[in-house]
Image (tube, grey):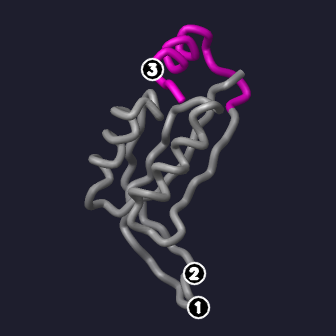
């Protein structure tokens, strides 16, 4: 199965536009945006920020292009990019997803 779920965090400002870019470039079939508070260590300090977690529905074939776009357009020095392979995807949803994403 080629479906992948990718987690990307983004600053609140610009997150919606970034998600729309991923879908318009056909690197994602869908992006869910969830407001989160992230606590993390950065350059020796513990930081806390409001962010948006993008849950990106895509395919294995689109991962390289998605990561390249992330590196070019994301404002963070080290953006989150975690790709997961689902254990199961409903056949109708998988067909839709694969039809909306083109590497």
Horizontal side of 8 relative to 11 (left or right) equals right
Question: Dot 3: within a 10 Å radius of its alpha carbon, few (fewer than 14), some, or many (20 or more) residues?
Answer: some
Secondary structure under tag 3 reads helix
Taking the spot 73% from the left edge, 28% from the top edge, the residue there is: 87
Residue 62 drawn above or below residue 36: above
Query: Nearer the viewer's eye, disc 1 or disc 3?
Result: 3
Quadrant where the N terminus lies? top right
Q: Are marks 2 and 1 in contact (CB under 8 Å)?
A: yes
Nearer the observer, 94 or 72: 72
Horizontal side of 2 relative to 77 (left or right) equals right
| Magenta residue span | 86-103
Q: Are marks 1 and 3 in contact (CB under 8 Å)?
A: no
Circle 1 sits on which residue?
44
Circle 2 sits on which residue?
41
Nearer the observer, 73 or 52: 73
Circle 3 sits on which residue?
100
Inter-mark Cα distance, 1 to 3: 41 Å
Nearer the observer, 4 or 48: 4
Mark 1 or mark 3: whose residue is earlier in sequence: 1
């Amino acid at each position: 199965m080629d479906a992948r779920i990718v987690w990307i965090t983004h600053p609140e400002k610009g997150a919606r536009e970034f998600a729309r870019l991923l879908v318009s470039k056909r690197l994602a079939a869908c992006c869910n945006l969830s407001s989160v508070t992230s606590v993390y260590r950065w350059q020796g300090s513990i930081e806390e920020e409001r962010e948006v977690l993008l849950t990106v529905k895509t395919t294995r074939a689109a991962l390289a292009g998605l990561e390249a776009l992330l590196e070019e357009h994301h404002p963070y020095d080290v953006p989150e990019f975690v790709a997961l392979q689902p254990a199961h995807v409903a056949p109708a949803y998988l067909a839709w997803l694969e039809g909306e994403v083109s590497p």
